[in-house]
Image (tube, coloured by chain):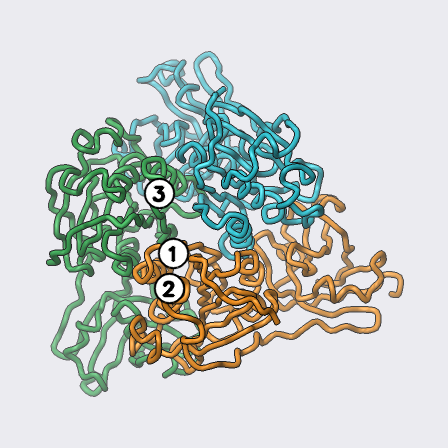
Chain colours: A green, B cyan, C orange
Amino acid sequence: MSDVRFVPNGIVTLTTDFGTSDGYVGAMKGVVLRHAPGLALLDIAHGIEPQNVSHGAAVLRAACPEFPAGTVHLCVVDPGVGTARAPMVVLAGGHAFVGPDNGLTALASAALGGVVEARRIDATGALASVLPRVPSNTFHGRDVFAPTAAALASGHVAPADVGPPLDPTPLPQEPPVREADAVRGHVAYVDRFGNAVTNVSAEDLSSLDPDGRSAEAAGRSIDLVATYGDVEEGRPCALVGSEGFLEIAIRAGNAAASLGLTTGSPVRITNRSKR
Amino acid sequence: MSDVRFVPNGIVTLTTDFGTSDGYVGAMKGVVLRHAPGLALLDIAHGIEPQNVSHGAAVLRAACPEFPAGTVHLCVVDPGVGTARAPMVVLAGGHAFVGPDNGLTALASAALGGVVEARRIDATGALASVLPRVPSNTFHGRDVFAPTAAALASGHVAPADVGPPLDPTPLPQEPPVREADAVRGHVAYVDRFGNAVTNVSAEDLSSLDPDGRSAEAAGRSIDLVATYGDVEEGRPCALVGSEGFLEIAIRAGNAAASLGLTTGSPVRITNRSKR
Amino acid sequence: MSDVRFVPNGIVTLTTDFGTSDGYVGAMKGVVLRHAPGLALLDIAHGIEPQNVSHGAAVLRAACPEFPAGTVHLCVVDPGVGTARAPMVVLAGGHAFVGPDNGLTALASAALGGVVEARRIDATGALASVLPRVPSNTFHGRDVFAPTAAALASGHVAPADVGPPLDPTPLPQEPPVREADAVRGHVAYVDRFGNAVTNVSAEDLSSLDPDGRSAEAAGRSIDLVATYGDVEEGRPCALVGSEGFLEIAIRAGNAAASLGLTTGSPVRITNRSKR
C-alpha cells in the first residue's frame, strides 16, 4: 500500500473505447474544460476494443503509472452503463482514477502500489453542483465521469468528499499457474504490431532456469530471447516486453497473425532441459 | 438566436476527416501554434468518414456545445476544396466555427441557439498578413482555416473583420416526417459500437403515446426502452441516446451489423396499440 | 544549411507507429510530463504503418516544418529497436528531432534547410540522471526518447550535451529520374483519401512543357490539372498536392483503390505533345 496522498497537478488523461470517429471523446473534453478551463488534457488511447474491460485495464497499466503523481485518469470502458454498476473514484500512488467500478483500473492501481482509497460517486454530496440528478442512460463518461474528473483535477472537490467508501470490483481474469518445471498462462491482448502479450510476468518466470527456458504456444516451441536483435527476421521468439510481461513476437513480422494467437490463447513456459 | 458574444478563451478544437496516419492534422496544429504558441489545442475526432459532411456535422453537434463559450472550432470535411465553395467563420452561442461553407457546422450551431453572425474569409482584409494570397488547391485546412482559427482564438482578429457577411449553406438532409400515429426518419450515422443513430429527436416522438411506442427498422419491430439495463443482452432495442436522438442498439452487441442498418436506412416509430 | 539555433519553446510533438489502441503513446506522454509537467504535447499521427520508416518520414515532412522554431519532435518508428542502431538528436531550422537513427527524420530536416547538428544519445553524459543505464529491449520510445525530448524541451539539457556527434543515416529511397522528355518516379505513400502521393516534386516537373504534361500510372494516361475543381467527379487526375509533390487523385473517389496503385507503383510524367 502506498501512503502517497493525492495532490492534483492539473493533468487529466483520457482512455476510452469511443474510437476517433464519433463525438463522444470530444464531448467529454468539452465538459472537463467547461468546468475547469486551465486543465491539461492528454489522450492515452481511444481505440480500446469496444466494451473490452481487460484490454482497457492492460492499456491503463502500461500508461498511467508513467504520469506524475497528482494526475487524474478519466477511464471509460463501460459495458454496464445504464445498469447498477457504481461510478467510482480510486486513489493509488498519488494518482486518481475516475470511471465505472468494473475492474478497468485494477491493474493500473495495483502497479501504483495498490488502492489507497475508493469512493462511490454520489450526485447528492459535494459534487451535486456539477453532476446532473438524472444522468443520461447511455453516456456517463460525459455526464458523471468528466465533471468528477474536472472537480478533482482542479481541486474543487477532495476525493474524500466524492461519496461513500467502496470496495472496488477486481478485474475478472485468471492469474498464471506455476507448476514444478513450468508456468502456464494465456495471451492477455495482442498489440498493434501483432505481439501477443501474455499475463506471465518476469517474476512468474523466476523459478525456471534462466538459461534453458522455452515457450510453447500455438502448438510449437519458441525460444526465449533477451531482445529482438537476438533473433533473425521472420522467426518467432518470446521475450519479456517493456511492461515486464512475456510476449510472443516475430521481428519484422506479425506473430499473432502468423501463429494464430488471440486473446486467451494458452502459453506454457518450461525448462527446455527438462522436457 | 443567442445573444452571447464571442470572447476568445484560448481553446481551439480540431475535427477532420484526415485520419491518424497522415501529416495533415499535424500540419494544421503546427500552423495554429506558429501563429499563436500559447493556444490549447484539443482533438475532437479525425476519423470522420472521408468527405462525409453529414457525419462530421453529427460529431460536431455532439461535441462542440459541451466546450466553454469562447472556444474556436476548426472543422475540415471539405469535399469542395478547390471549387468555389466559400471559406467561412460562423458564430453561435459565443462559440466560433471555422471551416468550409458546406453545412458541416449547421447542426452544432443550431444546437448552440442558431447562427448569430457568419462571414466569408477574405484574404485581402484584416487576415491578409496571415493568409496566403494563393492558397494550395487541395489543403485549405492548413492554408486558410488554421491561420484564421489562430487569429480568432488569440484575439488578433475580430470576427467582424474576417470578411463580408455570408448566408451559411444548410446541411442537405431530410428532416423526420410526423404522421398521424407515427414518425418516419432514417439512420443518420452508425457509431463505433454499432448503434444506429437516427435523425428522430425525443421531441419528434412527443406526439406519440409514451407507453406504447414501437420502432420498425430493418423489417422488424423493436421495443422502445429507457436504458440498456431494461433489455437482455443480445436483444435489439430502441432508445433515446445521449444527444437526444432515437438510436437502435443491441446491449453487448453491434446493432447495425446484426440488423443490416446503414446510414440512410428508414426507421418508423408508431403507437404500438394503434397498429 | 540553416543557421537558426535551437531555443526550446515548450512544445513537444509525437509521431509514432504505435496506433491508438495500446498504452505505448500514453506511456511516452506520461514520461515526458513526469520529467517536465509544463510542456505542451501535440499528437501529429500515431497511425504510421507499423515499422514503415518511409511512411513516417513523409508524415514528418508534411507536419513538422509548420510548427514554430524551438519545437521538439519525438519520432518513433523503430524497426531496429534492440539492435545496434543509434538513438539520436538532430537539429534543423531551429527544430529538434529525437528518435532512432534510421532515416525517419531525413525528409523533415531537409525541408527545414538541412541538418545543422546531430548527436548520438549517450546515457552516461548530461542525460545520465534521466536515462536508465539499461533501457528495455523493446521500448526505447518510453525509456530513451521521451526523457531526452523532455530534457531538451524544458531546457534542462542542451543539444550539444546529449552525446557525441553523429552522421545521420539517410532515408533509403530512390529519387525520381529526369529523362529527356519525361520524369520517372513512384508512389511514395497512399493517404487516407486514396490519393497516391509520388516522390516527384513540382521542381522535378519544371523541365517539362507546363501546358502539355500527362502522367502515366497503372497502365493509363492521366491528365495533369491545377485543382480538383478542374476535373469532373469520378475521373482520375494528377496534380501537385499541398506539400509540393505530384499525386494521382480522383475527385470524390479513391484513386489508389480504383486504379490499383500502392506504395512503389511506378509513375511517369511526359510531354503529351511528344508522345
| Numbered badge on residue C39 | 1
Badge 2 marks a residue whose secondary structure is helix
Three-letter amino acid code at the position of disc 2: Ala
For the residue pair B251 and C179, the one nearer the viewer reads as C179
CA distance for labels 3 and 2: 21 Å
Badge 1 local density, few (<14 within 10 Å), some, or many (20+)?
some
**Residue C32 in picture, x, y percent from top left:** 35, 61
| Numbered badge on residue A38 | 3
Quarter of the image with the N terminus of chain A is bottom left
**Residue C233 in picture, x, y percent from top left:** 71, 44
Q: Say which residue label 2 marks.
A: C150
Which residue is at 29% across, 46% downward? A74
Marks 1/2 in contact by CB < 8 Å: the verdict is: yes
CA distance for labels 1 and 3: 14 Å
Q: Is residue C216 above or below residue A148?
A: below
Badge 3 local density, few (<14 within 10 Å), some, or many (20+)?
some
